[in-house]
Image: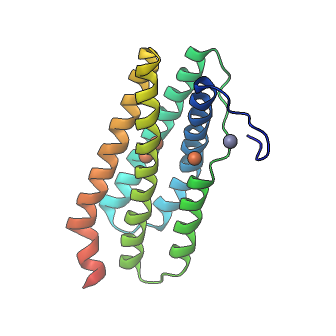
Amino acid sequence: MGLFTKDIKTMDDLYLHVLQDIYYAENQIKKALPDMIGKATNRDLTAAFKTHLEETEKQIGRLEEAFQLLGKEPEGTSCPAIDGIIDEANEVAGEIDNKKVLDAALVAAAQAVEHYEITRYGSLIAWSEEMGRDAIAKLLTTNLKEEKAADKKLTSIGERKVNLKAAG
Ligand code: ZN
Ligand code: FE
Ligand code: FE
Ligand code: FE
């Protein structure tokens, strides 16, 4: 979307824009996760990241189905928010030597990603329902449930395994 033009005129345009935004974000997350798997030390954390990478690949497939249902080609649009979250995670990780502190930073960064995704899916699902796009709402609800479950899992890994060790 151009910065100086008003490309988003209708609710349909906004809907497509946010769908393209989350499509771009999911693809950036898919690219970032292998690096996070490589950096994590805690076994539960690496396992959680690996599982979520597999889920992310399937989520991208569901988004492609959503584009298809709209009669559109799957396409991303720039998402400065997800780029910023990933850049910040990399910057912070680059400042940390201690492996346990690094694990705690990775949990926190991953939860920031999950929360961004949750807001995007939440809006798109609400709009889908209002617009009668039930099949898309269903696809996106599957993604949303996975993001919420991933967030919950990260909370419990942080609490049980990572944060205390980092503090101790
Ligand atoms: Zn735009
Ligand atoms: Fe996702
Ligand atoms: Fe965005
Ligand atoms: Fe996610």
Residue in view at x 38 percent, y 70 percent: 103
Of residue 6 and residue 56, the one placed in the foreground of this image is: 6
Question: What colour scheme has been applied to the protein in the rendered image?
Answer: rainbow
130 vs 122: above or below:
above
| The C terminus - image quarter | bottom left
Residue in view at x 73 percent, y 34 percent: 7
Q: Position of residue 131 (x, y in %)?
A: 47, 17
Of residue 32 and residue 91, the one placed in the foreground of this image is: 91
Specify the quadrant of the image occupied by residue 111.
bottom left
Q: Residue furthest left?
A: 160
| The N terminus - image quarter | top right
138 vs 21: above or below:
above
Specify the quadrant of the image occupied by residue 18.
top right
Q: Position of residue 35 (x, y in %)?
A: 54, 60
Residue in view at x 33 percent, y 67 percent: 42
Specify the quadrant of the image occupied by residue 23.
top right
Whether residue 117 sits left or right of residue 21 in the image: it is left
Residue in view at x 37 percent, y 64 percent: 107
Of residue 53 and residue 25, the one placed in the foreground of this image is: 25
Q: Position of residue 29 (x, y in %)?
A: 54, 49
Count the numbered circles shown: 0
Q: Position of residue 61 (x, y in %)?
A: 52, 28
Whether residue 22 sits left or right of residue 108 in the image: it is right
138 vs 28: above or below:
above
Of residue 1 and residue 138, the one placed in the foreground of this image is: 1
